[in-house]
Amino acid sequence: MIYLFLLGRVLLGGYFLISGIRHFKNLGPFAAYAQSKGVPAPKLAVMGTGLLLFFGGLGILSGAYIKCSVILLSIFFVFVTPKMHAYWTIADPMQRAAEQINFWKNVALWGAVLLLLAIPEPWPYALF
C-alpha cells in the first residue's frame, strides 16, 4: 500500500505542479482567458494561481508541508472554480457542458486534496 500511496502522491502532486508551471509558460493566453471571464488584473491572477498550484503540488509530491499545501490548493479551488467555471451563467449547451465538467472536476480534485489531511504525518518517503 505504501507504493500505491507514493504513486498517488506523484500523480496528484505532479498534476498540480505541472498545472502551475503551465500558468507561467502560457501566461498570455491564460491571462486573456481570465480577462474574458471578468477576472480583475488577469495577468497577476494567473501568476498568483500558478504559484498556488505549483507550491501546493510540490508539497504533495514531496510529502512536505501537507497542511500548507492543502490550504494553498483550497484557496485556488474556492476562488477559481466558481469564477472560471460558472456553467450556470452560460446559454450555449456545449460550452455549458464543458464548464460544468470542469467545475465538478475541480470540486472532486479539491475533495481528494482535503482527504490528504486524514493521512498521518510524516508520510512514507517524504523528502523533508
Image (spheres, grey):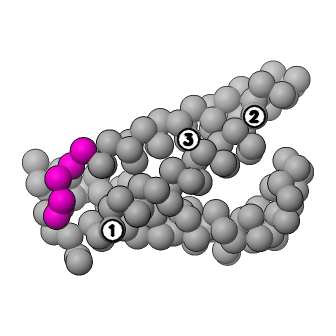
* 74 lies above or below 97: below
Residue 10 image-quadrant placement: bottom left
Residue that badge 1 annotates: 65
Mark 3 Cα-neighbour bin, 10 Å: few <14, some 14–19, many ≥20:
some
Looking at this view, is 116 or 99 the one in front? 116
Amino acid type, residue under disc 2 in the picture: Ala
Give me the disc on residue 86: 2
The residue tagged with tag 2: helix, strand or loop? Answer: loop
User: Which span is picked out in magenta?
Assistant: 118-123
Q: Nearer the viewer, mark 2 or mark 1?
A: 1
Look at mark 3 in the image and give the residue it sits on: 106
Residue located 25% across and 56% down the image: 7
Q: Which mark is residue 9?
A: none
Q: Main secondary structure of the magenta part?
A: loop
Marks 2 and 3 sit apart, C-alpha to C-alpha, by 12 Å
Residue 28 x/y as whole percent: 81, 70
**Label 1–label 3 contact, CB within 8 A:** no
Neighbor class of circle 1 (other Cα within 10 Å; few <14, some 14-19, many 20+) is some
Q: Residue furthest bottom?
A: 128
The location of residue 36, given as percent across then percent down, is: 89, 51
Tag 3: residue type? Asn
Which residue shows up at 55% across the image and 65% down it?
A: 52
